[in-house]
Amino acid sequence: MELAHKPGDELEVQGDFWNTLGVIKVGQVKGSRANALNKSKAVVFLGRGRPVGLGSAFGHRSQLTLVAITSVRVCCMDANLVRTLAMPDAEFRKALQDTAGSFVNCLTDWSRVLREDEFALKLYYALHLIATEGRSASFTMPSHAELADLLGSRRETIGRHLTAMVGEGRLERRDRRHFVLVSDVAIPSSAG
């Protein structure tokens, strides 16, 4: 079945048992993780092809809270059917293991980005990962507020750095929300 979500909808909640395993077909999702004091921080950005409810395939609680930041469509199936009918199939298990490995790699990449000291590099690398999630150099830009939340910044800082990136030729604006990341342009050490 396919489920549609609007911006702000929770697709998965940290600590809850989820009853579906799905794949993002279209849209952008932000993943957050709460600490022991229940304070939540954005830790990852997910796009097309990423799993939703991955823990449900193994009977585990959700590790992240996933929230739609654009309109999202998710193809999903009942987690009980996954465990009873699909898991015994070796090819399915291999595909699921590959998906889980790719998901961990994505989290690791975002962990590295979020620890970058130089903000201009942090933003550039974040945009690179966003474009990678869409499987294209062309991508839909999340709102400045969403990027600021993800990168631990303010939306004004995001706007200033994006303007600098466009001016330096590292980012091309197609229209209000669509951009192309130019990968062959050197990344300066500071955006001012």
Image (cartoon, rainbow, N blue to C red):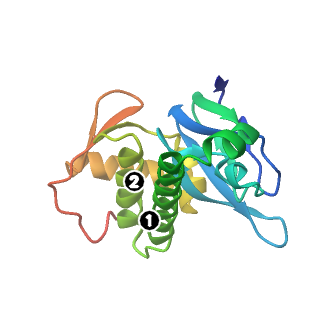
Q: 84 or 135, which lies in front?
A: 84
- Residue for point 67% across, 32% down: 77
Q: Is residue 180 left or right of residue 34?
A: left
Above-or-below relation of 85 to 112: above
Local SS, label 2: helix
User: In this image, 153 relative to 122: left or right?
Assistant: right
The quadrant in which residue 61 appears is: bottom right
Residue at the disc numbered 2: 129
Q: Which mark is residue 109?
A: 1
Q: Residue at x 30, y 40 (%)?
A: 136
Query: Residue farthest to the left?
Result: 184
Is residue 120 something that shows in the picture?
A: yes
Q: Is residue 9 left or right of residue 181?
A: right
Along the line of sight, which residue is nearer the eye, 94 or 183? 94
Residue 98 rendering spot, x and y as whole percentages? 46, 55
Q: Are marks 1 and 2 in contact (CB under 8 Å)?
A: yes
